[in-house]
Structures are given as structure tokens and as C-alpha cells.
Image (cartoon, rainbow, N blue to C red):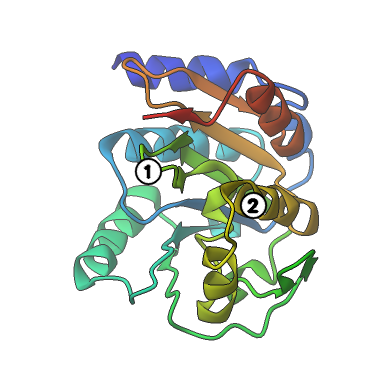
């Protein structure tokens, strides 16, 4: 209950544009979350979807795309979980398969070349990121821009990103992908207990959180 209250508070106190401003007109919206969905993810997704409906974007205009960095194909359990989420949220839910080749290339990233991402993003008029944004003890990123890269990268793009010798180069590529796939809104929290929950227009929120030291180590 405390986390749900924090999510509602964050949604009502957006950094930058409010949800109503970001979705002043209904948009075909792709919500991106991690495929390893936690209880907090479900709470946050449910609250976000209800808020989208209130500002005029119906469930019929939304889909949930579950990021999966692989490099292996998503486990059958993830696809089963996606069916449960579809019933809970009332919208299509797709699990990204990082072993499949994608023909959708929204742009290029320095040193990595063409950035091929999940084709489900092709028709999106708005992209929303949801989930914990943190850094694991081994330095690997979780959530935030990492939901897009490596989370929605195809096999070839994932290999090129993972081959970057320095963490700083991988982080720079993650930030760069948000310039070629703009994030309209984000609902993020850190790994603290209880977590700090923040929401707002994508670029402004991510910049504000980075200035505060996010993503923090778990």
C-alpha cells in the first residue's frame, strides 16, 4: 500500500510535463517494462494505465512491451506471465525476443552504427518507461534507458553494445538511444527500501535523476 501511495504521489507531481500535458491528445502508446516483472512493477503499471485512461488515452491505444536483454530467447515462464499481465492490464503484452533480427532502425549511435530495436516500437506515437532504475553490483544497468538498450535490441545490436570495452561507452550508448527513440514519460524508482519513486517527461526526468546520482547501486 505504501508503494502504491508513492506511485500516485509521483504521478501527481511530475518532473517537467504532467501526464495530462504529455498526453493532451490520445496517442498510440508503447509502455516498456522489464520482463522479470515484480509486484511493484504490476502496481506501478496498473496505476499508470488508470492515469492514462483518466487523461484520455484508452487501453485500446496502449500495449506493454517487456524488455529482455537476453542474449538467450525469453523463457516460457515469461510468456506465461505476459498472459497474466494482459488480463490484469486489459491490453496486449509482448515479450521482446532478443534472438530475433529486427528491421526497424530508428537511427544510428556513434561507434555502434545502426540501432536496431524491437519492431513493436515502429508505430508508437508515445513511449513510456516503467520500473526500477538501478545499477547492479557488477555495474550492469537495470531499467531506465537500459529498457531500450540493451532491453529491446536485436541480437546483432546487443552484441555490438556488449562488446563496448568500457562501461562509460555502454552508458553513453544507452543515453543516446533516448534521442533517437524519445521517451515521452517515465515512472521510475530506485533500489532503496522503501524506494524513491519519481515520474515525469522522459528527457527531463532522466536528466534530473542523473544529476541526483541515479542509477544508484543496488
The image quadrant of residue 99 is bottom left
Q: Is residue 181 left or right of residue 57?
A: right
Which residue is at the front of the view, 58 or 109? 109
Disc 1, SS? loop
Dot 1 and dot 2 residues touching (CB under 8 Å)? no
Could one spot residue 179 in this view of the protein? yes
Image quarter for residue 61? Answer: bottom right
Residue 97 higher or lower than 124, as above or below: below
Image spot of residue 92 (x, y percent): 44, 64
Q: Tag count in the figure? A: 2
Q: Residue at x 33, y 15 (%)?
A: 194
Alpha carbon separation for disc pair 1 and 2: 17 Å
**In the rendered image, which residue does mark 1 sit on?**
138
Can you give x and y, in whole percent of width and height, for residue 21 in the image?
78, 31
Of 140 and 123, which appears nearest the observer?
Answer: 140
Q: Which residue is mark 2?
A: 174
The residue that appears at 55% across and 33% down in the rendered structure is 187
Q: Nearer the viewer, residue 60 or 63?
A: 63
Residue extending farthest to the front is 165
36 lies above or below 193: below
Residue 29 in the image, given as x and y percentages of width and height: 63, 55
Give the secondary structure at mark 2.
helix
Q: As displayed, is residue 116 above or below residue 138? A: below
Neighbourhood count class around disc 2 (C-alpha, 10 Å): few under 14, some 14–19, many 20 upward: many
Answer yes or no: is residue 19 visible. Answer: no
Residue depicted at 78% across the width and 45% down the height: 25
**Quarter of the picture holding the N terminus:** top left
**Quadrant of the snapshot with the C terminus:** top left
User: Upstream in the sequence, badge 1 or badge 2?
Assistant: 1
List x then y, in percent, for residue 191.
38, 26
Identity of the residue drawn at 54% across and 86% down: 101
Q: Left or right: where does residue 142 sit relative to residue 105?
A: left
Amino acid at each position: 500500500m505504501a508503494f502504491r501511495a508513492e506511485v500516485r504521489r509521483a504521478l501527481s507531481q511530475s518532473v517537467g510535463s504532467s501526464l495530462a500535458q504529455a498526453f493532451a491528445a490520445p496517442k498510440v502508446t508503447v509502455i516498456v517494462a522489464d520482463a522479470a516483472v515484480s509486484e511493484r512493477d504490476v502496481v506501478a503499471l496498473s496505476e499508470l494505465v488508470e492515469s492514462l485512461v483518466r487523461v484520455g488515452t484508452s487501453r485500446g491505444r496502449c500495449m506493454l512491451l517487456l524488455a529482455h536483454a537476453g542474449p538467450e530467447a525469453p523463457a516460457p515462464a515469461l510468456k506465461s506471465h505476459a498472459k497474466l499481465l494482459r488480463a490484469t492490464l486489459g491490453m496486449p503484452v509482448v515479450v521482446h525476443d532478443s534472438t530475433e533480427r529486427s528491421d526497424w532502425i530508428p537511427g544510428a549511435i556513434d561507434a555502434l552504427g545502426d540501432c536496431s530495436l524491437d519492431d513493436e516500437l515502429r508505430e508508437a506515437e508515445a513511449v513510456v518507461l516503467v520500473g526500477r532504475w538501478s545499477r547492479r553490483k557488477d555495474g550492469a544497468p537495470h531499467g531506465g534507458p537500459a529498457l531500450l538498450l540493451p532491453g529491446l535490441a536485436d541480437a546483432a545490436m546487443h552484441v555490438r553494445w556488449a562488446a563496448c570495452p568500457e562501461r562509460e561507452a555502454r552508458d553513453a550508448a544507452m543515453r543516446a538511444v533516448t534521442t533517437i527513440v524519445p521517451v515521452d514519460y517515465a515512472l521510475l524508482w530506485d533500489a532503496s527500501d522503501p524506494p524513491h519513486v519519481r515520474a515525469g517527461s522522459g528527457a527531463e526526468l532522466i536528466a534530473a535523476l542523473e544529476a541526483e546520482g541515479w542509477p544508484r547501486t543496488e
